[in-house]
Amino acid sequence: MSTAQDPVKSDRAASRKDRPTGSTHFGDNDFAEETTPEIGDATWGEVGRACCVHDAMGWGKIFIGVCIACFFLYFFLFSLELLGNAAKVLGGCSAGGLMSEDTNPVAALVIGELATALVQSSSTTTSIVVTLVGAEAVNVKTGIYLIMGANIGTSVTNTIVAMGQMGSGDQLERAFAGATVHDLFNLLSVAVLFPLELITGYLFRLTSAMLPDSVSKDDKWNGPIKKIVSPLVSRVLKPNKNVIKEVAVGKVESCDAYYPVYCVDGIEDYKHCVTDTKGIEGQGVGLITCDKKVGCPAFFQHGASKQDDATSGGICLFLSLVLLLLCLMGLVNVLQRGLMGMSTRVIYKATKVPGVFAILIGAAITILVQSSSITTSVLTPLVGLGVIQLEQMLPLTLGANIGTTITGLLAALVSGKVEALQVALAHLFFNISGIIIWYPLPFMRKVPLEGARALGRYTRRSRSIPPIYVAIVFFIIPLLLLGLSELFQQGSVGYTVLGALLVIFVAFAIVRFAWWWKRQEGKEKFLACLDRRQTMSATTKTLPEDMQYLKAKVGQLMEHTGLPEDEEEGVEVEALKSVDEEKPLEMSDATEEEPLDMTGTSDSKGE
């Protein structure tokens, strides 16, 4: 392919053990066995030759590969956007209802996380929270806790993307570790800064001191990626974000007030369905709206009920997940083919940049795409392939956290409210504070990295770990915390006592689990259980082949021994029983005859 490929594809060896340099190449049999400390350091000259020195056929293959990769990447981004839109249609009313009232800090944290998990976008949640604060529907302190929760919920998307690489155990392990390092960093940041904010009001006081006297309104800004992908997505499904905001603000009691969908004269376009019905009660669009430039989407319907829109959202959610999986497999396959035979030393040299620069790169990418979920979801497959190391993925995701705060700042500028700007600034400094705590010091950075590696290793033992993890971390634990916090808000002594008892029970259960995990070999027992389940699963998969093999061997045995082959099952069983009964008799006869034969032999010898 190239005339100067010494460091890259210099041989046909299938293992690093077969190479004089000992370097691992993509596609090697022992590619997954190489650890980070074992990777040698390439020179920039090697990187330059691997990148730029190719013959005509090599450049042609690279051009075709880039075009195919861009095709899959575009529809991968399209499916992510469609997934978010479908989630907003399905969960928009619930998310708006969750954020509709001031509540206690724990409930606000959980509501922010659940709302983000439902609409699959922290940018949307942040914008809604900023709007709520600007409209004085939620106070600033509650808004800060909602933003903290949104930071946790934003990482559910790339965790789902990681599950798309279940076809390969090695890729799933790396991809799931790359996805969960984002989760763990956000969870650890909340674990430190949430109680700190409760006790000291750190973020509230810091942002209060930075606020200007007034904020001038500005126009909304859309990133270039949104402008490329959104027009096509809007032709399929476009969610009405105003519904979520109006339900949250309390302008309407429920989403039922928007139905049935009505367009003037039954004409389905932006003018007749949105412009001409604006301000008229009981007329207009519901959870699905029309776009000013491209018109009404394919799933928009005049006279649609709430159930019709929910059905459309469900169909689009399913289609987006299928398309996401197909594009992910296509993208991974193209990248694998392009990297086949490439030395890991060269790849890691090219992708290894200082942590500060990696943070800036992650922030810049997120500002362009206006979504940290998209940034981390695109990077996760690269971690799964081994192109990006986990140590590089962490600062990139931290940069994505910084970049996503820009959306909130822009929403605050649009609102023109000082309070809205304060919440947006709190979001920014929450992420900056988390980075200062968990990234600069190596031993602190090791906590999320090692935790993510452990979760990745567990997926190798059982493919059920990722869905269980998503269900527990993003839904079961938040709902449990929400239920407990609500008990203390009822104003009843009975509920308060019950809540206190449940908190004590949960705390005891956590301590008991930690003791079992660390002191009573709980971790080893858990891993042994996963190994047993994996063995049973593998045995079950191969059982039909094993049975066919045994049946063939039994047939060969019957031919060798001359046993009759009976057609009826009952006859076969009787035949087997009779054979089993005859065997002891034959054995006994043989033992009785044996001494006689031996005696006869001895007599003949004596004669």
Image: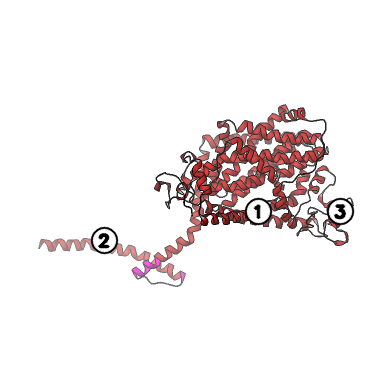
Q: Which residue position is annotated with label 2?
A: 591
In the drawing, does residue 465 fall left or right of residue 408? left
Q: Which residue position is annotated with label 3?
A: 275
Q: Are marks 1 and 3 in contact (CB under 8 Å)?
A: no
**Viewer-proximal residue among 87 and 56:** 56
The amino acid pointed to by label 1 is: Tyr
Between discs 1 and 3, the one toward the N terminus: 1
Q: Secondary structure at mark 2?
A: helix
The amino acid pointed to by label 3 is: Thr
Q: Which residue position is annotated with label 1?
A: 74
Write down the region rendered in magenta. 554-569
Can you give x and y, in whole percent of width and height, for residue 395 in the image? 60, 38
Between discs 1 and 2, the one toward the N terminus: 1
Disc 3 to disc 2, C-alpha distance: 104 Å
The quarter of the rendered structure image containing the C terminus is bottom left
Residue 561 visible to an observer of this rendering: yes
Q: Is residue 509 magenta?
A: no
Q: Secondary structure at mark 1?
A: helix
Q: Are marks 1 and 2 in contact (CB under 8 Å)?
A: no
Q: Categorize mark 1 by other alpha carbons within 10 Å: few (<14), some (14-19), many (20+).
A: some
**Residue 493's image quarter?**
top right
Q: Nearer the viewer, mark 1 or mark 3?
A: 1
